[in-house]
Image: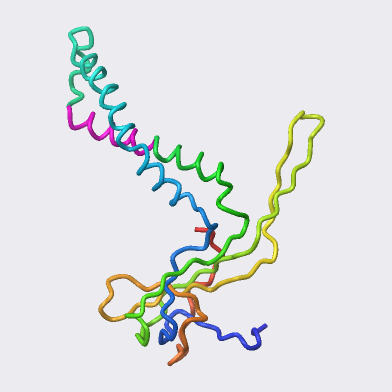
Amino acid sequence: MKRVGKQIYRVGDLVEIISPEVFLRCDYPYSYADAKDDMKHLFKVDIEEFMEGVYHTLCGTIKSPEFHEMNAIDDDFLNISKERFISGIIKILGYEKVYLEKFGGSERKVITETKEEIKGLQGVVVAKKLKQSGKYNIISNYDNSRKMYIYDKKLENVKRHVILHVACDGYHEPILIEDIHVTKIQEINNIKDDNPCTISNK
């Protein structure tokens, strides 16, 4: 059934950006990306110094005569592995931080950035996806058989947002923007929409 009062956009439609609100993400006030950046800013130097000591010892062990069969492991490999470990530690700290902060609140909402230079641009819709905003309600129940609390969460007051990927001249990548910020200039004709709008939490 067609939604009354709601413009439907399909892949291939020509649209014009009337409100320059670029879509960044649909997330909580304090996201995992925010937490990871904070942990990197606070602890990256300390982690690097720690890993430098670990790998100094490791390199000496690997290159010792007792472990001569492992001499094929070179410095380039060790440096790559070191960066991987540093990145892994920062990711773990980021997860811990975002949970400690409880994501900055229970409201999940669309976050945008105003870019006046894209106002009035025309482009073709090349993809679309559906995001959901709302407020998470967490319910806890004690399970006597397992002797532990079981947590369940549900997104309430759900609002759906259609995010369009609009390809414009002069831009290497499509502009992501919610459908309420564009207007249709020309509708696609006799072409099947092979990219249906699906729900995504990313």
User: Which image quadrant is residue 169 in?
Assistant: bottom left
Q: For the N terminus, which image quadrant?
A: bottom right
Say whether residue 82 is magenta: yes
Q: Could you tell me residue 45's position as x and y percent? A: 30, 35
Residue placed at 61% from the left, 59% from the top? 107
Q: Could you tell me residue 119's position as x and y percent? A: 37, 84
User: In this view, which residue lies farthest toward the front?
Assistant: 42
Q: Is residue 161 left or right of residue 37?
A: right
Query: Vertically, is 84 above or below 193?
Result: above
Q: Could you tell me residue 47's position as x and y percent? A: 33, 32
User: In this view, which residue lies farthest toward the top?
Assistant: 66
User: Which image quadrant is residue 168 in?
Assistant: bottom left
Q: Main secondary structure of the magenta part?
A: helix
- Which stretch appears magenta? 75-88
Residue placed at 56% from the left, 41% from the top? 100
Query: Vertically, is 187 above or below 105?
Result: below
Q: Nearer the viewer, residue 107 or 77?
A: 107
Query: Vertically, is 156 above or below 48?
Result: below
Say whether residue 157 is magenta: no
